[in-house]
Amino acid sequence: DGGITQSPKYLFRKEGQNVTLSCEQNLNHDAMYWYRQDPGQGLRLIYYSQIVNDFQKGDIAEGYSVSREKKESFPLTVTSAQKNPTAFYLCASTIEGQGYNEQFFGPGTRLTVL
Amino acid sequence: AQSVAQPEDQVNVAEGNPLTVKCTYSVSGNPYLFWYVQYPNRGLQFLLKYITGDNLVKGSYGFEAEFNKSQTSFHLKKPSALVSDSALYFCAVSRRWGNNRLAFGKGNQVVVIP
């Protein structure tokens, strides 16, 4: 059964802690993306990767970091430098980094800072 | 940079009536346009896309959208709304010859009243 998985579904973090959100896909997609969703603001792009061992900053990369060591995995670390990390985080992938391909989304991780 | 406007925060419609969700876009050159739907605490699901050709695009669950280049619009429509269509709808645009970076609108909450 192909798809994108994200874990955990819910994550609680104390201020000052780094946390890592997992994103795995078995669709053999080349490109992967991380978005942040806040109420009334739509989705904003954090980082994206079009190929293994390469990634680019999106519109709101400050306070986040990523790695792309394997084609199927694109973990996102929310660092203590991110001032307002409470949000719903969505991972997506697409077959290749061309504009006409739709993106497939994971179920999301809801991060709450305590 | 590309952008999307979804002017209405919420669309209320009676079950069985036609449903329209509005979207206008801004992009340099010709666009690729997408509609996604999101149910509470879930990821986004792809509904349909416009790449080229016929301006009327048909998608999943009876939805369709019409591309209007002169008005830079891509409104989503369904002839007869169902209660199960109640969800958050996102319009998105990417550039041709781009890197598949999607710009999302802020989303429209659709409420179908039984």
Image: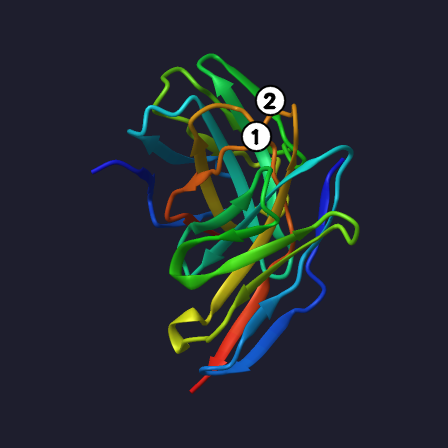
Q: Are marks 2 and 1 in contact (CB under 8 Å)?
A: yes
Camera-side residue of A18 and A77: A77
State the residue at coordinates (45%, 37%). A92
State the residue at coordinates (78%, 54%). B71
Question: How many residues crowd around disc 1 within 10 Å: few (fewer than 14), some, or many (20 or more)?
Answer: many
Residue beneath label 1, please?
A: A47
Applied colour scheme = rainbow
Q: Is residue A111 above or below residue A92?
A: below
Q: Is residue A114 visible?
A: no
Q: Is residue B3 visible?
A: yes
Residue beneath label 2, please?
A: A56
Q: In the rendering, at what x and y percent does residue B67 appear?
A: 65, 51
Amino acid on which the number 2 mark rests in the picture: Gln
Q: In the rendering, at what x and y percent does residue B21 appear?
A: 61, 65
The outermost residue toward the front is B54
Q: Quadrant of the N terminus of chain A?
A: top left
